[in-house]
Image (cartoon, rainbow, N blue to C red):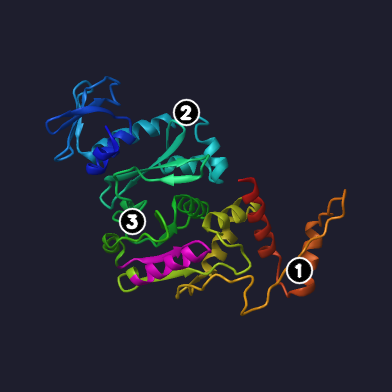
Amino acid sequence: MDKAFFKKHPKAKIFETHGVDFAGVRGNQLYGHCPFSDKPDKFYVNIENWLWDSKTAGMSGNIAQFLEHVNEEYVSAAGNEGALDDLAKHRGIPARVLRSYGVGCNGDRYTLAVRDHQGRIVDIRQYDTKQKIMMSTAGCNVGLLNAHLLQERQSEPVYLCEGEWDAMAIDWLLQLNKAPGIVLAVPGAGVLKAEWVPWLAGRKIHTLYDLDEAGENGEQLAFKRLGSAVKAITYTHWPEELPSGFDARDWVRYGVIKKKTPDLCLKRLHILFKKEPRATAPSPHLAGKDGPTLMIKLRRTKGKSLDRPSLDQVHATYRTWLKLKDTDAIDLTLAVALSQRRA
């Protein structure tokens, strides 16, 4: 099938993305290779109502049921011991947490099913570890991760994260502390659909958006969409000393993995929750005719490398110029910077 066909019928991409190799069209029926029986020309899709059936596998249904079947295969493929170890190391999240979220494998990509508040799969997200990109299934509408938990756990607070990995990290932190909470994830800071608002009505919401301009804009969107609908809402004001792009997963990796103090990690996170969203500010300019320019030049002696200071020396230098209660912020900033180099 050519690009023009898929542009006219975008839902056909859902099937193609997950193993259906279409061979042609007969009337209102697409036909092609069946991903369940591995037989050619035995899988049919009606392009008017998007119902499908496999003549050889004895299976049929709608798009949500198709996604359910392929997701079962992906989760099964990740069931072998060690199958998620590389991803766990790559993302800094234990394999057992990844499994609890139903992370699966599809060839060289990892998969994650996203369900609506009634439990139906609306999207299967795919993560490429080489490109470090999480992508939705073409033709699917993006969803709110873990929305299906809202109805059955109505008394618990809700943690709203920017992205799936942040959600898993915060969920892990809550589990370690045996603390209540449903952790949701929007697929991006700029996405908070109006249709999701009723699912969150009357709840206590903690937003945990990234430390960058997009995260601040996401908070403004949450304030606008949820402010009058929910019982209470807070916004995470990350310490200013932290680098741009810092997120909830970085916070958990530092507190749980490096410091091994999950109780303090959660306690201090709650201290960062404020009733007002962060103010969106323009990015600072390093140079310009209306302001001074600050330039720092590091001189390297030819043939010699710069001496690297010890951590104690770094602490001492900061304490010379700043009044610090402790050095946690410095350690956290360095840990994040070094982890980004290795990622």
Q: Is residue 310 above or below residue 46?
A: below
Alpha carbon distance from label 3 to label 1: 46 Å
* Residue 3 placement: quadrant: top left
Q: Which residue is mark 2?
A: 80
Q: Secondary structure at mark 2?
A: loop
Q: Amino acid at mark 1?
A: Tyr
- Earlier along the polypeptide chain: callout 3 or callout 1? 3
* Residue 60 screen position, x and y as percent: 19, 31
* Residue 34 placement: quadrant: top left
The reply to whether the magenta stretch includes residue 214 is: yes
* Residue 107 screen position, x and y as percent: 44, 30
* Residue 54 screen position, x and y as percent: 21, 26
- Earlier along the polypeptide chain: callout 1 or callout 2? 2
Determine the residue positioned at 35% across, 30% down.
Answer: 73
Alpha carbon distance from label 1 to label 2: 48 Å
Q: Secondary structure at mark 1?
A: helix
Q: Which residue is mark 3?
A: 153
The one nearer the camera, 297 or 124, is 297
* Residue 252 screen position, x and y as percent: 56, 55
The reply to whether the magenta stretch includes residue 263 is: no
Q: Nearer the viewer, mark 3 or mark 2?
A: 2
Q: Are marks 1 and 2 in contact (CB under 8 Å)?
A: no
* Label at residue 171: none
The one nearer the camera, 340 or 93, is 340
- Earlier along the polypeptide chain: callout 3 or callout 2? 2
* Label at residue 318: 1
Magenta stretch, residue numbers: 202-224
Q: Secondary structure at mark 3?
A: loop
Alpha carbon distance from label 3 to label 2: 31 Å
Q: Nearer the viewer, mark 3 or mark 1?
A: 1
Q: Is residue 199 left or right of residue 106?
A: left
The one nearer the camera, 117 or 29, is 29
